[in-house]
Each structure stands twice: as structure tokens, then as C-alpha cells.
């Protein structure tokens, strides 16, 4: 007779525990193939439990193929392979934690400071009340119409882009949109990227099987001659504030890029406008798409920098000539941004909260940039550094005068709790980036830590 201690089952139901015990005996060979099990009533009486407990355990074992029921004869063990005793599982490696830096000059580039929690919470409650069951329905693949209309009006008013809502595609961040673009434009094409430049775009294109070529950036952006000689069909650039150099591409260079795109079949330019909202002097630089007459510029932007990275809402504006192909090839995808966030963001933009937030944050970031730059040029590094490309965006460059190579200085700095991010780390083509130049993402820097970190850094330059 099978004997199991049902009182040692812990939090398991009685039938579940009995099922597991019998299954283990079958897999271990203690119950052999063809062996008959006790009747349900007999086993229930032996174990001092209800008949239904045994009945449910036997039924589960039969459903999984461990037992076979024969009418008027009972339950018999089915032939199964005995499970070898598994070795103890290896200890999973510990997840590497984020080191605690005294000063991290290459850390997150901002995007959470000043988030309007109260306004966002109020709009979210209104959306939940007003939209109701509509929030539970499937969202159109390119995003809810209300958000696309709000983005369309915002782009026209702020960036001079005339884009019908139908041309706008909403997705969960720019990385997702890069994936969609490489599927839309073709994996067989050659994608040109800035060097030095943003590494994630190249990683996404390469993982999709596309060939990437890196084009040198000079004082005006990607070199036109290098672009002509590259054999690329798609160019991915950030002309309004190039990352990481901070270069702004002038109008003549932009016109040359658009001429290049119009001279070849299937050529397109992906205009990554990742932080153009934070320009501190003069008017915003006109976008490529706003001066594109041939329909070759694809505009892409995100709310990660302007609102919060965790919001995961980005969007792209497709040329009209790509719309039909996008719908036929990628229209089966479900939208990757939840409806609640889309309706809330639509109201946030339409009711003027987004413009107010941007105006407030421009002042905030301008003040933080000025204080950080002044502290670097007049503090412990005075006379041994120069701030460059600080007119826009959430990062600037800091040229140093060290007597040691970049890698050695970075190693020394790590040992005292200071993380440095050099311009040379973003290059693929040797010798293109200026050495001894730091990329400083200033929004998250605490002033007290900054002073102490700069003191330590100054002592490492020699």
C-alpha cells in the first residue's frame, strides 16, 4: 500500500501533494510499469483522507500519461523513462549592480527632473473616467488618433513640420522604431551612421542583419564626400545637435544631404531629433523634414528626454510615399504603448502642459548648465580645461590638458570613484574623435559631489 504523509504537504492542496508523490515514485522506478495502484477508496482509507482527494490525484496522473485506467480493474502505471537524478543547479551569477560613483560625468542625461507629477496624475484620472472601456480595446497599430493629432499640431507649431496625423507612428521608444525602420526600408540596404555617434542605432541595425558603415563627422556634421563614397542607401544622423560632438549641421550641408537622397532610388535620411527641445540660444534649428521636398526624410523623436525615460513613448513621421508600404508590411504589429499613457499624453500636449513644462525645464537646465560649466572652468580644473558645445542639449564637451592617455586617466578616476566618458569611446573610425575630451551629461550632477570629484580629477591629470 502506498504510504505518504499528507500532513507534510505545506501549502499544497492534498490532491496536488498526493499527485506529486505518486509521480515521483513512478519516475524514480519505485512504481514499475504495469503495476496496479490501490483503488481510490482503499488508498483514501489508508491515508485517512477523502476519496475525492485520491480521485483528483489519479485523474491528473492519467491526464499526463503516468497512469492508465482499465474499466473494472483499476489504475495501472504506464511505461515511462526513469528520470536520472539531476545534478544540483549551478548558482546563478549575481547581477552586476550599479557602482556607487562619487561623480559620474557620463551618467544618465536627465529627463526626470521637474516631472509634473500632479498634472500627470490628474490627467490620468480624467482619462480613466472619461475613456472607460475604450481603454480596454485594441489600439491602432500606429497609435491612438488623439495622440497623433496632438503631436502633429505640436510639430507644426514648434518645429515647422507639416505632418498629417496619418503619417505619424507611435512606438515604445526610439529603439523599437529603429527596428521598424530597418524592416520597412530593408535589411539588405547599407546604413550610414555618424562617427563618433550614438551606438544603439548601429546595434539595432546590425542585429537586424543590416550592414552598417560609419561616416566621419567634421565641424558641420557628416562629411558629404564620405557619404557619396560610402555606398550607403540610408543615412541615420542627428543634425540638430549631434551626439556626442554637439555639432549643428548648417543649411548648406543639409541641402547637400537631401540632394544625395534624391539622386538614388530608395535612399532615405533618418533624422534623429533626440533633444532639440533644449536649445538655449536663438530659435530652434529647422528640421530636415521641414525643408525636404522629395519625401526622403524620416523624422524621429522621443519623450524620454523631455518627460521621463520610463514613459517609453517615441514617434516617427514617415514620408507620404512610405505610408502604403508601411501599412501593408508592418500594419499587423500591435501598438506597443498602452492606451492610458497615450490618451494622457495627448491631453498633456493639447492643454498646453507640455509647452509649459518645456519652457520651465529650459530655464532649469540652462541654469544647471551654466553653474556646472562655470565650476569646471573656475574650480579645481581652472586653466586646464575648456567647455565646448554648450549652447544646446543636455550634454557638453570638456577638453582637458592631461599628461596621461585617456584610458589611463579613466582607470585612475575609477579607482577614486569618478566615472569619465571620453569622446573617443564613441568612435569606430580610428583617429576621428579628439582625445582628452570628456562628454559631460550635466543634468544629474550634484554640485557638492561635483566639487569633490573635480578636486580628485585635477590631482590625476599629471
Image (cartoon, rainbow, N blue to C red):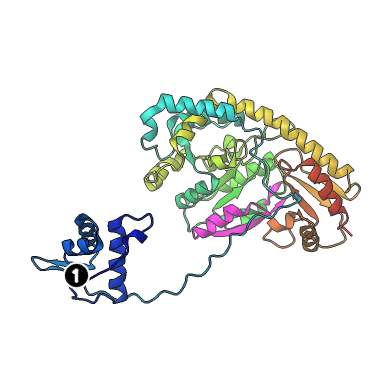
Residue drawn 79% across and 53% down?
A: 437
- In the picture as drawn, the residue positioned furthest to the top comes out as 351
So how many labels did they put on this image?
Answer: 1
Residue drawn 58% across and 27% down?
A: 118
Residue 363 belongs to magenta span:
no
Q: Is residue 75 visible to the viewer in this orientation of the structure? A: yes
Residue drawn 67% across and 46% down?
A: 108
Residue placed most toward the observer, 381 or 31:
31
**Callout 1: few (<14), some (14-19), or many (20+) C-alpha neighbours within 10 Å?**
some
In terms of secondary structure, where does tag 1 sit? loop
Name above or below for residue 297 compared with residue 49.
above
Residue placed most toward the observer, 180 or 380:
380
Q: Position of residue 373 (x, y in %)?
A: 81, 41
Left or right: where 432 falls relative to 236: right
Name above or below for residue 114 compared with residue 401.
above
- Quadrant assignment for the C terminus: bottom right
Name above or below for residue 443 compared with residue 245.
above
> Where is mark 1, residue-wise?
37
Q: Is residue 152 visible to the viewer in this orientation of the structure? A: no
- What range of the chain is rendered magenta? 195-223
Amino acid at each position: 500500500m502506498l504510504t505518504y504523509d499528507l500532513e507534510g504537504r505545506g501549502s499544497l492542496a492534498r490532491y496536488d501533494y498526493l499527485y506529486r508523490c505518486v509521480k515521483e515514485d513512478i519516475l524514480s522506478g519505485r512504481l514499475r510499469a504495469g503495476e496496479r495502484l490501490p483503488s481510490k477508496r482503499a488508498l483514501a482509507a489508508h491515508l485517512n483522507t477523502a476519496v475525492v482527494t485520491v480521485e483528483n490525484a489519479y485523474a491528473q496522473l492519467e491526464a499526463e500519461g503516468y497512469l492508465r485506467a482499465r474499466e473494472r480493474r483499476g489504475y495501472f502505471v504506464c511505461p515511462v523513462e526513469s528520470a536520472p537524478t539531476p545534478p544540483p543547479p549551478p548558482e546563478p551569477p549575481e547581477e552586476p549592480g550599479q557602482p556607487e560613483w562619487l561623480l559620474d560625468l557620463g551618467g544618465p542625461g536627465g529627463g526626470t527632473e521637474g516631472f509634473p507629477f500632479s498634472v500627470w496624475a490628474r490627467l490620468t484620472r480624467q482619462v480613466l473616467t472619461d475613456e472607460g472601456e475604450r481603454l480596454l480595446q485594441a489600439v491602432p497599430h500606429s497609435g491612438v488618433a488623439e495622440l497623433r493629432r496632438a503631436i502633429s499640431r505640436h510639430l507644426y507649431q514648434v518645429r515647422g513640420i507639416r505632418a498629417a496625423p496619418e503619417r505619424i507612428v507611435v512606438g515604445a521608444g526610439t529603439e523599437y522604431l529603429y527596428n521598424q525602420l530597418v524592416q520597412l526600408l530593408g535589411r539588405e540596404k547599407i546604413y550610414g551612421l555618424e562617427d563618433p555617434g550614438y551606438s544603439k542605432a548601429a546595434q539595432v541595425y546590425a542585429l537586424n542583419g543590416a550592414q552598417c558603415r560609419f561616416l566621419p563627422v567634421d565641424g558641420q556634421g557628416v562629411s558629404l564626400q564620405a557619404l557619396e563614397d560610402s555606398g550607403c542607401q540610408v543615412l541615420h544622423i542627428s543634425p540638430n545637435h549631434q551626439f556626442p560632438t554637439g555639432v549643428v549641421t548648417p543649411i548648406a550641408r543639409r541641402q547637400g544631404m537631401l540632394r544625395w537622397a534624391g539622386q538614388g532610388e530608395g535612399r532615405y535620411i533618418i533624422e534623429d531629433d533626440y533633444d532639440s527641445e533644449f536649445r538655449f540660444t536663438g530659435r530652434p534649428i529647422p528640421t530636415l523634414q521641414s525643408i525636404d521636398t522629395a519625401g526622403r526624410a524620416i523624422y524621429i523623436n522621443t519623450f524620454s528626454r523631455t518627460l521621463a525615460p520610463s514613459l517609453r513613448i517615441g514617434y516617427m513621421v514617415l514620408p507620404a510615399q512610405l505610408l502604403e508600404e508601411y501599412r501593408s508590411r508592418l500594419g499587423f504589429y500591435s501598438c506597443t504603448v498602452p492606451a492610458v499613457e497615450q490618451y494622457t499624453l495627448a491631453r498633456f500636449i493639447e492643454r498646453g502642459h507640455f509647452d509649459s513644462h518645456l519652457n520651465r525645464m529650459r530655464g532649469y537646465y540652462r541654469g544647471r548648465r551654466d553653474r556646472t560649466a562655470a565650476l569646471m572652468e573656475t574650480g579645481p580644473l581652472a586653466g586646464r580645461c575648456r567647455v565646448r558645445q554648450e549652447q544646446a542639449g543636455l550634454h557638453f564637451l570638456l577638453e582637458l590638458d592631461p599628461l596621461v592617455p585617456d584610458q589611463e586617466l579613466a582607470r585612475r578616476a575609477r579607482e577614486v570613484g569618478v566615472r569619465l566618458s571620453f569622446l573617443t569611446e564613441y568612435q569606430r573610425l580610428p583617429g576621428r574623435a579628439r582625445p582628452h575630451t570628456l562628454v559631460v551629461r550635466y543634468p544629474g550632477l550634484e554640485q557638492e559631489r561635483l566639487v569633490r570629484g573635480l578636486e580628485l580629477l585635477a590631482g590625476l591629470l599629471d
